[in-house]
Amino acid sequence: MASSSKKRTDEKPVNGFLNASTLSKAFASGSTWEDKDEFLDVIYWMRQVFGLVQGLIWGLLPLKGFFGLLLFFVFNLGIVYLYYNMFQKIDDEEYGGATEILKEGLMTSFAAFLVTWIIIYSSLHTSS
């Protein structure tokens, strides 16, 4: 009975967020990823954080227009590429190729970026 009350540490989180062991592997260079989805979850959540941070910075700087959108994609794709290629040293063919990794969570991150950018820019740089 005592063993049934213990929580298993190898279970996936129910809410979709990363667990502590996944986070520790995400911040350690050259980690081994047994589960493809675990690594892609790290990419997904990393992108969401970068999208919000970029939206905040773009709104504070007052970047606008196509240049701001282009910079978002350059930085977002560049950071993810450097993370998996240089920091984690992942063979992208094991994960379906570079495009599979680079598109993981991109549109969701773009949406979070746009909402944050628009709200911050509108509240700071427009007169009502």
Image (tube, grey):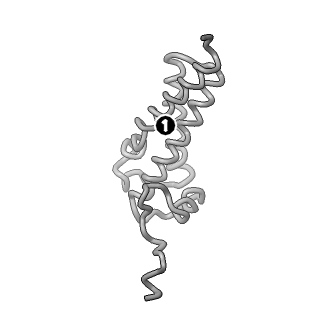
Q: Residue 80, percent across and down?
A: 51, 43
Q: Residue placed farthest to the front in the image?
A: 128
Residue at the (49%, 64%) spot, across then down:
32
Judged left or right of residue 103, residue 47 is: right
Q: Nearer the viewer, residue 72 or 90?
A: 72
Q: Is residue 21 above or below residue 82?
A: below
The amino acid type, in three-letter code, at marker 1 is Leu
Q: Specify the quadrant of the image occupied by residue 59.
A: top right
Residue at the (53%, 19%) spot, across then down:
67
Question: What is the number of callouts on the image?
Answer: 1
What residue is disc 1 on?
A: 77
- Say which element carries label 1: helix
Q: Residue 78, percent across and down?
A: 52, 37
Q: Specify the quadrant of the image occupied by residue 61.
A: top right
Residue at the (63%, 29%) spot, across then down:
57
Q: Nearer the viewer, residue 101 or 23?
A: 23
Q: Is residue 12 above or below residue 76?
A: below
Judged left or right of residue 94, residue 53 is: right
Judged left or right of residue 11, residue 50 is: right
Q: Residue 35, percent across and down?
A: 40, 63
Q: Quadrant of the N terminus?
A: bottom left
Q: Nearer the viewer, residue 19 or 95?
A: 19
Q: Is residue 34 above or below residue 49?
A: below
Q: Quadrant of the C terminus?
A: top right
Residue at the (51%, 54%) spot, across then down:
89
